[in-house]
Amino acid sequence: MEATLSKTRLGFIETAGGLCQKVGMPRSTGQIFGLLYLSSTPLPLEEIASLLSISKASASTGSRQLLGWQAIRQVWVPGDRRDFFEARGELRDVLRAGYDNLMRPKLDKSIRKLEGFVDTLEAERTEGTISKEEYQFCRARLQQLKKIQDRVHQLLPLAERLL
Amino acid sequence: MEATLSKTRLGFIETAGGLCQKVGMPRSTGQIFGLLYLSSTPLPLEEIASLLSISKASASTGSRQLLGWQAIRQVWVPGDRRDFFEARGELRDVLRAGYDNLMRPKLDKSIRKLEGFVDTLEAERTEGTISKEEYQFCRARLQQLKKIQDRVHQLLPLAERLL
DNA sequence: TAAATCGTTCAGTTCAAACTGAACGAATCA
DNA sequence: TGATTCGTTCAGTTTGAACTGAACGATTTA
């Protein structure tokens, strides 16, 4: 299929790519999702690459990334050996999966790190490495930070439900 | 002051820098905030640079960025010509300001963009540029996307209150 | 079995953002 | 006024991630 893309889809793809890039993920990955999200029919890897004017390599890595996030799924077309991809229509579930698989682990890790800092702070105090003043000040700030993290932990499940 | 940093502060600085980098902002900016957040006394630009082993130029741009986000504030020390900086202790307010000044405008912009896509889609339909099928499919997906954006708009003020 | 097609992997390149050193203007001090 | 001490700005460099082309293994087709 040599079809060209409509203006709408072109603009959408560009926006999705730019959005992803701003959040720190590869632009091409966002472009792929944008392309598939407005595609009424599953597309093979080769066509994704050519429509977006990117290499097959980028299309491959990008789509595997999106698969990992469960943002797209793989579709087998009878009698066709190629891999076809389509976007998951249920964006709610995509976001939920994104939260479970990407956000939550990172948050948990950051909490553990924060507790680590509190520990080393205590150690440094007993060692006498730091002054009482610095100890108290840092302790207070770290605790405040922890409080905020806890609030975030309360908020995220709530968000999950509201969305 | 030629004081060296405690282990706690060093680790905290590194974490803050890495965190910022992952979210798409300069690492050094996060380091500066990390340094100030655990500093019981305001620091002059020069010392920020030397403690973090970065150039004065980076320290300057980074601190101005943080000032813009209201994450730190400038303090004048009587009899000292230099600029001193300290982190805002009230992280709640920092987050709120970050939401108001950074998140919200971007969200609004993306909504406007989305509406633009709907419009061009309509136009392309009446022009006959796209098939009825593609039109209907894209329209449905764009509408679903808009629904999610609306939910996010409901959620964010709520988050602001909970934090 | 040979030829062809498909997707992945990997080394090398490209590219954009961050960072730096130096020059500069402004403000202070002698 | 001349000499310093600030902070900012800007051109050039560095750095790291994204992207590419080519080679490869796997699977299918002739």
Image (cartoon, coloured by chain):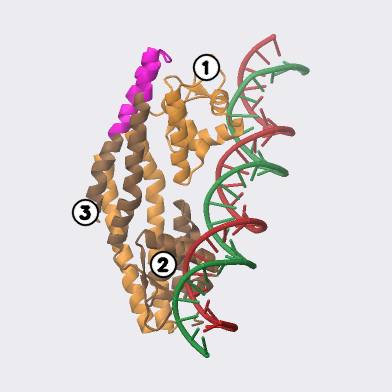
Chain colours: A brown, B orange, C red, D green
Q: What is the number of the mark on residue B3?
A: 1
Q: Which residues are magenta?
A: A120-147
Q: Amino acid at mark 1?
A: Ala
For discs 1 and 2, the disc positioned in front in the rendered view: 1
Relative to B132, D10 lies left or right: right
Q: Is residue B135 above or below residue B87?
A: below
Q: CA distance from mark 2 to mark 3?
A: 29 Å
Q: Secondary structure at mark 3?
A: helix
Q: Name the mark on residue A73.
A: none
Task: Determine the secondary structure under disc 2.
Answer: helix
Give the amino acid type for the residue marked by disc 3 in the picture: Arg
Q: Is residue B163 visible?
A: no
Residue found at x 47% / y 33%: B14
| Subunit under mark 2 | B
Residue identified by numbered label 2: B116
Which chain letter matches label 3? A
Percent x, y of residue A82: 44, 76
Q: CA distance from mark 1 to mark 2?
A: 56 Å
Q: Which residue is mark 3?
A: A161
For mark 3, does the 10 Å Cα neighbourhood hold few (<14), some (14 to 19), or many (20 or more) residues? few
> Numbered disc 1: what chain?
B
Q: Percent position (x, y) of residue B140?
A: 31, 72
Closer to the camera, B3 or C25?
B3
Label 1 crowd bin: few (<14), some (14–19), many (20+), radius 10 Å: few
Q: Do callouts 2 and 3 point to residues on the same chain?
A: no
